[in-house]
Image (cartoon, rainbow, N blue to C red):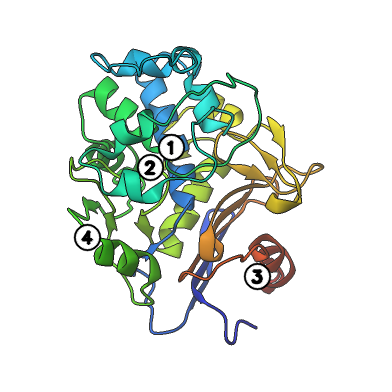
Amino acid sequence: MIEGSNICQIYVRKNGGSVLDIRRSGFKTGDAVNVMSVTKGIMGILLGIAIDKGFIISEDQKVLEFFDGYVVKRGEKTIGDVTIRHLITMTAPYKFRSEPWTKVCTSSDWTLAALDLLGGRSGITGEFKYTTLGIQILAGMIENASGMKCIDFANRYLFEPLEIPGHKIHGTSSKEDQFDYLMTKKPRINEWYSDPQGTVTAGWGLCLSARDMSSIGQLIIDEGMFEGRRIVSSEWLSKMTAPYLQLDKTFGDMQYGYMWYRPHKDRDIFAAIGDGGNVIYADPVKRISVGVTGTFKPRIFDRVNFIEDIVIPMTAEM
């Protein structure tokens, strides 16, 4: 079924109970994997929690409201109009054609380096421009609004309430360390990559197990509740998974919400998707949540089909 694949773990919950736990390549159930851009989906939930708790008013706040003292570059007029909504729907404007990874990832403060990229002469066009570095700004906003490091915010308000192991920051890095973090085929600990300021990488670098990912999917299925406790509002989850944009073939013709995908136009299926085929898949109607982890392998886009065609049928009698 998955012979020769880069898949490390598959974990499925159905009607709230665990029904499938597949591990391969020496990975155990609790081992963590860098889930790449699934990290963005987690940031979407953290933003909702920050809004629920009143740290942030709404996604329509201007980005610069959270960065007192930031000096706007001379001649830059667009940045002042950019809102959180622009960031999380990938419609924010940036002053680059391709993401300047070296410039940001060798800076002393990745959030401010990303903020320097925001804006540009074209203004806000509403055009979808997928970016990983730009989402770094969101981590800085949550920290500045809450007065907490983003890793502590995530542990207190999301991971620990869901019985996901507490995470720590990865710490300072080198070019070689960043490469190893992305490319390793070995299990990682429960950590989150971070910049020299101890701020997590908001667009990538969170390490989770497939079991942990299925817990996040279950949270969405249960409309923000876990064992009778409210973790995030159902109102936010409805906003987060609403279809705001229709994507092209590059993104599988899916629809896009607040950093979450909708693979089907006619069904309420929600997914957080990252490179290597890392996926959180949630089906509220069938009450099935799936987590899939995988080591880095470029251009894997078939995981939703794989889940629907192979994994879910395996649970039919469970």
Residue 230 visible to the viewer: no
Residue 235 visible to the viewer: yes
Q: Is residue 182 left or right of residue 58?
A: left
The amino acid on which the numbered mark 1 sits, given as a three-letter code, is Ile
Q: Residue at x 55, y 67 (%)?
A: 298
Q: Is residue 183 above or below residue 56?
A: below
Element on which disc 4 rests = loop
Q: Position of residue 106 (x, y in %)?
A: 26, 49
Q: Residue at x 27, y 37 (%)?
A: 150
Viewer-nearest residue: 313 or 190: 190
| Residue 13, image quadrant | bottom right
Pointers 2 and 1 in contact (CB under 8 A)? yes
Q: Earlier in the sequence, mark 4 or mark 2?
A: 4
Viewer-nearest residue: 178 or 17: 178
Q: Earlier in the sequence, mark 3 or mark 2?
A: 2
Q: CA distance from mark 4 to mark 3?
A: 38 Å
Residue on which the image places disc 4: 174
Q: Position of residue 8 (x, y in %)?
A: 47, 75
Q: Earlier in the sequence, mark 4 or mark 3?
A: 4
Numbered disc in front, either 4 or 1: 4
